[in-house]
Image (tube, rainbow, N blue to C red):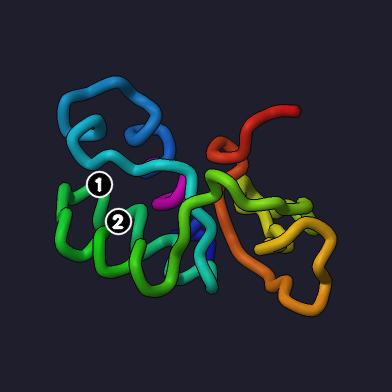
Amino acid sequence: MINQLVALLAVSAVAALPTPSSQSAGLRPVACETQQDLFDLLNAADRNDLKEAARLTVGACRPLAGLHYDIVDEENGVLTVRLFPREDDWTSSRLGFTLDEMVPVN
């Protein structure tokens, strides 16, 4: 678990740098169904594996743009968010995981 957190922090630090490789990966703010899906997406982006990143973005992760969400929990830079396809529609809401740096500061 600690190794995963160290790896996540390293990937986050590298992803935040304005390098050509991170810009070409085009990783936008997303929320994933599980923490493992989030870590897999970050690893794919770090490796510039566009095919794997696209597979995860279409399947297990979705862009945060245009979604309503509430932050439920935060642990070691990973946020648990409740996603609302329609504002305040609790029946269709679900949990997702994202990095705290991907969530805009309100």
Q: Read off the residue under disc 1.
A: 46
In the figure, 8 relative to 17: above or below?
below
The residues tagged by marks 1 and 2 sit, at their Cα atoms, a distance apart of: 5 Å
Quadrant housing residue 27: top left
Checking the image for residue 43, the label placed there is: 2
Which residue does the image show at 62% across and 52% down from the upper left?
67
Quadrant housing residue 102: top right
In the figure, 98 relative to 16: above or below?
below
Q: Nearer the viewer, residue 22 or 64?
A: 64
Quadrant housing residue 37: bottom left
Where is residue 7? Give x, y as percent. Answer: 40, 52
Where is residue 98? Give x, y as percent. Answer: 56, 53
Assign a secondary structure to mark 2.
helix
Which residue does the image show at 80% across and 79% down from the upper left?
91
Residue 101 left/right relative to 94: left
Residue 49 left/right relative to 73: left
Q: Amino acid type of disc 2? A: Asn
Labels 1 and 2 touching (C-beta < 8 A): yes
Which residue does the image show at 55% across and 49% down from the upper left?
64
Q: Nearer the viewer, residue 58 or 97?
A: 58
Q: Main secondary structure of the magenta part?
A: helix
Segment colored magenta: 6-10
Checking the image for residue 35, the label placed there is: none
Q: Amino acid type of disc 1? A: Asp
Residue 34 part of the magenta-drawn span? no
Assign a secondary structure to mark 1.
helix
Q: Nearer the viewer, residue 73 or 61?
A: 61
Task: Please identify the residue farthest to the bottom as the structure is shown.
Answer: 91
